[in-house]
Image: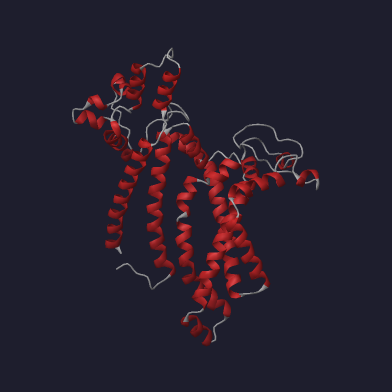
Amino acid sequence: MYNYLIRRFFQMSLVVIVSSMAIYFLLWLAPGGPLDELKMAGAADRRSRFTEADIQRVAEYLGLHRGPVWGYVAWMTGEDWFGAIGRSDLQTSSCRAKDTTCSHGVLRGDFGVSWNVARGQPVGDVLISRMRNTMILMVGATLISLLIAIPIGIYSAVNQYSRLDYFFTTFSFLGTAMPVFWFGLMMIIMFGGNQSPIYKVFGLPYLPTGNVTLARAPLPGSLLGLLGAEPRSWLDIAVHAILPVTVLSLLYMAGWSRFMRSSMLEVLRQDYVRVARAKGLRERVVIYKHALRNALIPLITIVVFQIPGIFGGATITETVFNWPGMGFLYVYALGADDYPVAMAFLFISSVLVVIASLLGDILYTVVDPRIRFN
């Protein structure tokens, strides 16, 4: 087992290095960026204050004068590495002017500063500021989905072709095929705002759909006003999270319950399950002790890769509900040409993917004693 983990560590390190290179070079080659905007402004208006010298000065300040190869090295190791090899010309002008070590670098846990999203602020602080909202959304949706999808999948497999099995199967097909943005908009129309049918027709309190970070008093008729939630309190955040968590939970449940049902049906047809029943064991013992553990293997493969999703958030759902999480931040950073924030998001996501892959392999040995890495 230890030899396997050591081999996997080296493999993971190689994958992370290759993915980091792909992230940097693809964003470097992508059209747009702060320099292109300055060049277009100068070409459109010759009286513009942005001259070639100004553009070169901005490029040196942002570190874009180094080119893709040296830029990648600076992003990974920090600018003080150039001083150690006698290439101070590759350092940014701000680094030389302030006479600092400029020791930021991905290998040191520092992703530099934001260009546009939070100009001048460390990228790590920008990500941490959105992490809480994303964790509330993704962890809540994941736990709710697992607690409901697994029992539904087991029941559908044990009671195959029953009425409830047909109902759950239809629900899973609809949930899998339903576009996320459309479902989110329908939830907003039905339950969000004082013009929703739940409030105008049935007189029930409506749910908020706006930005959870806005400090404003709850409106009359809303669930926030009924509960008397203070702005930015935990109760306020929980009520704001009801609609996006519900949308994600239903979509996850639809797919995960289907996977659980298929896996459970395959296991229930195995010989060792027939032998357990022939021995006179109770059906509950056969299902939960002998069949369930092996049926969880395909579901583990899916769920462990939800770990990067917990960090990355649900981009479409956060955008539809204006939820200030990591997915919304990533889309905003790409639109604002804030490459340090976008690269940090993609790099951390790639690291979490390889960690999730290793965690899945380890969990296989827990649920299935036949699997051993010797």
**Which image quarter holds the N terminus?**
bottom left
Q: Answer left or right for 332 relative to 49.
A: right
Residue 11 lies, in percent from the top left, at 29, 55
Q: How many marks?
A: 0
Residue 72 falls in image quadrant: top left
**Which image quarter holds the C terminus?**
bottom left
Res. 111 in view = yes
Pick whichever, 342 or 311, lies toward us.
342
Pick whichever, 90 or 4, lies toward us.
90
Pick whichever, 301 or 286, lies toward us.
301
* Residue drawn 51% across the image and 46% down it: 313
Residue 366 lies, in percent from the top left, at 42, 67
Position of residue 240 relative to residue 11, above or below, is above
Residue 74 falls in image quadrant: top left
Pick whichever, 192 or 179, lies toward us.
179
Residue 247 lies, in percent from the top left, at 61, 51
Residue 215 lies, in percent from the top left, at 63, 32
* Residue drawn 54% across the image and 54% down it: 142
Position of residue 373 relative to residue 67, above or below, is below
* Residue drawn 34% across the image and 23% down it: 61
In this picture the colour scheme is secondary structure
* Residue drawn 49% across the image and 75% down it: 267
